[in-house]
Amino acid sequence: MSTESHLRLVWVYPDLLSTYGDRGNLLILEHRAALRGLPVECVEVRSDRPLPADGDIYLLGGGEDGPQSLAAQRLIADGGLHRAANRGAVVFAVCAGYQLLGRSFYAKGTQYSGLGLLDLHSDRGPSRAVGELAGDIDARLGLPPLTGFENHGGRTHLGPEAHPLARVTAGIGNDGTTEGAWRGRILGTYSHGPALARNPALADLLLQWAVGGALAPVDNTWPERLRKERLSAVTPS
Amino acid sequence: MTTKKLPLRAKLATSATRSAAALSRVTGRGDGSVIGGRIGLMIDPNLLSELAAGRHIVLISGTNGKTTTTRLTTAAMSVLGDVASNALGANMPTGHTSALAKAGPTPYAVLETDEHYLPQVLDATRPRVVALLNLSRDQLDRAKEVAMMAALWRETLASRDVQVVANADDPMVTWAAQAAEHVTWVAAGQRWHDDSWVCPECGSPIERIGEVWRCTGCALHRPVPEWTIQREGVVDPTGMYHEVKLQLPGRVNRANAATALAVAAHFGVRVADALPRLAEVKSVAGRYAMVERDGRLIRLLLAKNPAGWLEAFDMADDVPTLLSINARDPDGLDTSWLYDVDFSPLRGRRVLISGDRAMDLAVRLTVNGIPFEHVPSFRQAAAAVPPGRLEVIANYTAFQDIRAELDRVN
Ligand SMILES: [Zn+2]
């Protein structure tokens, strides 16, 4: 945690990378930190401002093609996210934000350089992936199955230095087989929008990484009921 | 226009449209406006053009407020004579065909038009006026993204000679409408800003100071509106203030009324003549009407997307409130938008939740710090609250389900 003992949550470029309820992940982290009595500071950084280097968790959301390529260019020029990642800050990215953490991605038919924070590249798929997404998460992370909703036209190919976040059990994810990627404290997923609403244990993992210790348990009645409903909707009975 | 002038095939198709619609109604399969039009267009693919020919047509489009503005515009235009309209919200060409066939020959028609279908319907009906209300995120798992929709409108309007009435407070609508040669600007407001922070022309940030907005990178800016909302009324292009008394709640409906008045003015309707007609509208396809059941006074508000929810909170009274959410095909399958809505205005009210996707709403309200009770059905929600007012805010199919339980109130 940063020196002021506030957990700093940084929402990167809400003016460019915000569609589909992306604010949800910020709100959920803030809520679950508050339940543990952790003081939180939420910082929304527009794309014309420098990115603070002292954040604890950086959040990147989804975006349309134009804003996505613009966000990547500005993040590369700014360098703040690289500096934060290098000193061990947590980065959580969804959809377009996830793609731009890789080495390259396609937007409006053109290949753009990504930030290279994850060893992966993205291209266009044969069709748009829209619908429920579920998968068994990498056992090293110690999390229950992933559940989400995906809506993307890209496909993502992982290099040797990126671990798949999950093995797909429903939906497409990266390529129909794996979904998302992680390395160190950088984690990306195609589970779009408020991905953490259905994955409270993943939200807690990000918080644990940031605070460097275990968190007290909290009441998960409603998130668990939501998870059960969504996972059973994609599991053939 | 008279039915006699219709070619034989069109006459046959018109009559098939009407009888199929009637059959669909008596068999209880629906209001018939889609199936009738579909059959008519199968017999005669040009039927919509033929039915539109000779009428003065108005198209109303936008993400929110289409059905209400269509109803208000129809009311304003009725000063001049009979007006055909797809009042029930079937807003694609099948619905338009059915509405015009059913109405018979009328000098005027006001047609609510789905945003995606605007180019086709413009070509088929050759309207005198097109009103553009707003553009925001809506059913994103399948709808066009906002910038793409604005680009489609812009391209459509650049190549057609039509009078446009457009919302000067919405940058996306403004950019699209500016392509047209003749535009009347209405300051219809924009409570929801999150889809217009980036300029559709050049990609630079859009800056807002009060109601004025401008692009920081190019010349796109808020046009000077000819119609504005002031206090409880509207100011017309001559600068005259008119008090607007509506039975429909909220500022957004005053704005919809301003758009209706601006449209009708293009046909020579005077504001003073239109206002009493607007005041008669008390319900729009089940929305806004107060229904009494077992001592509960229940009002239904429809909210289909984040911008619509913000408007609904503005309209809703401070009373026990049921929120009901589905994610069936017509709603869009994705519930992520729940996190684009700040439910704080409901804090302090008794909140009940229901619908297919009540669990998504439960998690959202928990994160928002709003206490709630989960009820399995509308009936149980009504039973759970004491006699008195109950406000219901629901998205599309949840709204229709509740409306059916209330015996299809109008
Ligand atoms: Zn611009």
Image: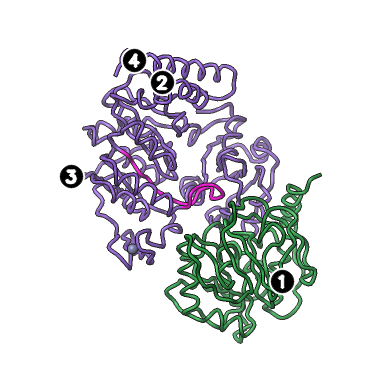
Chain colours: A green, B purple
Task: Locate residue A13 relative to residue A207 in the image: left or right.
Answer: left
Report the chain holding disc 4. Answer: B
Q: Amino acid at mark 4?
A: Thr
Q: Is residue A178 above or below residue A47?
A: above
Q: Main secondary structure of the magenta part?
A: loop
Residue B357 at what x, y percent from top left? 66, 46
Reading the image, the residue beneath label 3 is: B238
Reading the image, the residue beneath label 2 is: B101
Q: CA distance from mark 2 to mark 4?
A: 9 Å
Q: Amino acid at mark 1?
A: His
Reading the image, the residue beneath label 4 is: B3
- Residue found at x 34% / y 38%: B245
Q: Are marks 2 and 1 in contact (CB under 8 Å)?
A: no
Can you name the residue that lies furthest to the left here?
B238
Reading the image, the residue beneath label 1 is: A163
Crowding at dot 1, Cα within 10 Å, few <14 / some 14-19 / many 20+, comes out as many
Label 3's element?
A: loop
